Image: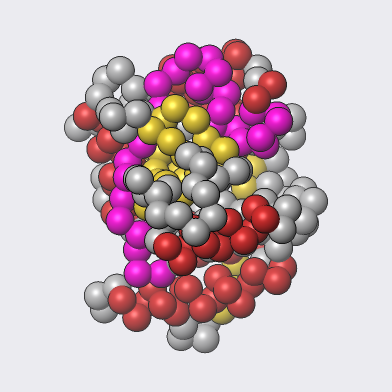
Amino acid sequence: MARIALIIPARFASSRFPGKPLAPLAGPDGGVRTLLEWTWAAGGAVPGIAQCVVATDDDRIADHARSAGMAVIMTPDTCLNGTERCAAAVPALAQMPDIVVNLQGDAPLIPAAMVTAVIERLLADPRLALATAAVPASPAVLAHLQSDQAAGRVGGTTVVCDRRAQALYFSKSIIPHVAPGSVPAQPVLLHVGLYAYRPAALNAYVAAGPAAIELQEGLEQLRFLDAGLRVGVAICPPPGWDLVELNNPTDTPLIEAQLARRAAQEPA
């Protein structure tokens, strides 16, 4: 069996929400945990994980994580994104893994089945450097994305795949283009920021350095495509709750509401 390490990259210095991993979130039972604790619990629900660690450059996050029983690896403060932080953490793992899962620290609502689907997508095709996830956008979600775009706001990230379910491009714009009021010929795929990499791909990512298109879109995964690496996409059904990320303090009640929705649908 493949050795799988799950890494949760977490940083304190967020321009929109400083200290975000330590933000308190109330669960459906009224109990309060930090965002990092909720994300750690989501990672712990994934079967077949050999190692699970938090990767951070901040002592406050590290102290909190250790006090809550989490394993921690300290990484440089020069890491530009979560992928670079995962790459920096790999040499310090107890065992060299076959696959590294990046479960971003601000996405505690990703279901375990989706993580498993991404891992299986990578394992099924040795030509892939990494795999990620996407869900078909419902008409309501597509309308919301179009509303954001019309207002000049950045909404979710979309991805276009080829017939082999390999990524052709990721964008913060809606791709492929859908004319307002029209029905798309194929579903618009909403990208979920979840990744499974081969260690060699992480090394190649760091060696390549930032790509111009990565910086222009503000999407770290575009560096893989710019470097000519194959990115598989696991197209998953949307869960019964919204995959909201905690990006701003005002997102807190949205996350708490979705935690309650998830708890109501998961078996006791």
Where is residue 64? Give x, y as percent. Answer: 64, 59
Residue farthest toward the bottom in the current orientation of the protein: 30
Where is residue 145? Give x, y as percent. Answer: 56, 57
Where is residue 110? Give x, y as percent. Answer: 42, 57
Q: Is residue 61 left or right of residue 200?
A: right
Q: Is residue 119 left or right of residue 18?
A: left
- Quadrant of the drawing holding the N terminus: top left
Is residue 234 covered in magenta?
A: yes
At 62% from the left and 61% from the top, the residue drawn is 147
Can residue 192 be seen here? The reply is no
Front residue (pair 170, 36): 170
- Quadrant of the drawing holding the C terminus: bottom left
Can residue 202 be seen here? The reply is yes
Q: Is residue 268 above or below residue 92?
A: below
At 62% from the left and 47% from the top, the residue drawn is 10
Write down the region rendered in magenta: 214-241
Dividing the picture into quadrants, the one containing residue 119 is top left
At 64% from the left and 58% from the top, the residue drawn is 148
Q: Is residue 136 left or right of residue 124?
A: right
At 22% from the left and 29% from the top, the residue drawn is 124
Q: Is residue 233 left or right of residue 176?
A: left
Front residue (pair 140, 212): 140
Where is residue 152? Give x, y as percent. Answer: 73, 53
Dividing the picture into quadrants, the one containing residue 66 is bottom right
Is residue 9 covered in magenta?
A: no
Colour scheme used in the picture? secondary structure
Instruction: Tally the numbered discs.
Output: 0
Q: Is residue 56 above or below residue 213?
A: below
